[in-house]
Image: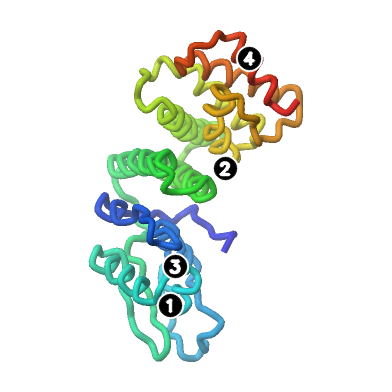
Amino acid sequence: MKNISIEKTEVRSSLEVWDFMQDRQSDRHSKLQAYCSLLNKAAVRYVPNSVPKGSIPKLKEYQFVTTISELAEEWHWHRATVRSFLDKLTTLGQLDKEPLVKSFVISMHCMTNGKPSNLEVVHHLDFMIDYTISLWSSGKANNHDVAKMCVHITACGIEHFKSTVPDCNADMLRNAEDEIIRTFICSLTASLFHASKQKVEYTVLCDLLYSFFVEQLSQKWEALLLLLEELPLVVLKGVPTTLKLVSEESSKSFQQICSTYRQLSDGGLSRSNGSDAAEQHSGI
């Protein structure tokens, strides 16, 4: 399911749903991952090979076929846990289940092609950015899953811009994407300081991270999240970075980021020491 098109698909949710999605230690597969699995299946009208095609009714948009056993195996959950999870999502208005002979059809009501108001979309994007970053900073979601969420939220934001500005050109779309990415990066940067800094104080660091993300990381969110995860350890504790800095330019840019972070971190060391430490552990 790697080539799922999300260009025209929006997902509506609620604070109650995302609160329910928060990870618990007892889950082998996080609720967030399980929920995304359901969304992915609905996006492509998934039907498992084990279910005879002749026994399946014609699927409508955002419907798919599955079994409790299949989901339990995929998510590494007990069958009873899968049933409870689906029942809770049904109660929250996210889906409906229609039983078949040895499987069932799930309809994901949270997915729609409709166009909500501008205020709705902006509020939803802001909430999703904040929620995604809270998952990452609290360790409740790994870099890989958070990176996928960043890509999806950015795509949703661009689609909203295209729908509200029908005559937009390539430059306008690029600027809209840049704005969403910068918002993400500034929020991620703020999470490093736990709100102890005013936004104006870390604007320079945001700009450096944005340039590094675009020019050196080819807009790979997972690599950026790794950089931010390691940054305090590299700068303040001298731990070597695992990022692959393959050029002198990328090394210098990384050193700039480290030096700027040190100035903001109240680590008590001089700027020159910060640059030396960054250079020592940059891998160049």
The residue type indicated by label 1 comes to Leu
Instruction: Give the residue type that dot 2 points to.
Output: Glu
* In this view, the mark in front (1 or 2): 2
Find residue 59 and name its label: 1
- Element carrying mark 3: helix
Per the image, label 1 sits on a secondary structure element best described as loop
Nearest to viewer (mark 3 / mark 4): 4
What residue is drawn where x is 75% and y is 31%? 246
Question: Between marks 4 and 1, how big is the CA–CA gap?
Answer: 59 Å
**Location of the N terminus (image quadrant):** bottom right
Q: Position of residue 186 (x, y in %)?
A: 44, 28
Q: Real-space Cα distance between discs 3 and 2?
A: 25 Å
- Mark 3–mark 1 contact, CB under 8 Å? no
Q: 29 and 110: which one is in front? A: 29
N-terminal label among 2 and 4: 2
In the rendered view of the protein, which quadrant contains the C terminus?
A: top right
Q: Residues within 10 Å of mark 1 (few under 14, many from 20)?
A: some
Q: Secondary structure at mark 2?
A: helix
Of the image marks 4 and 1, the number of the one nearer the N terminus: 1
Q: Amino acid at mark 3?
A: Ala
C-alpha separation, residue under disc 3 versus residue under disc 1: 10 Å
In which image quadrant can residue 121 be found? top left
Residue of label 3 = 42
Q: Label 4, secondary structure: give it.
A: helix
The residue furthest front is 237
- The answer to whether residue 57 is left or right of residue 229 is left
Tag 2 residue: 222
The residue lying toward the viewer, choosing from 204 and 124, is 204
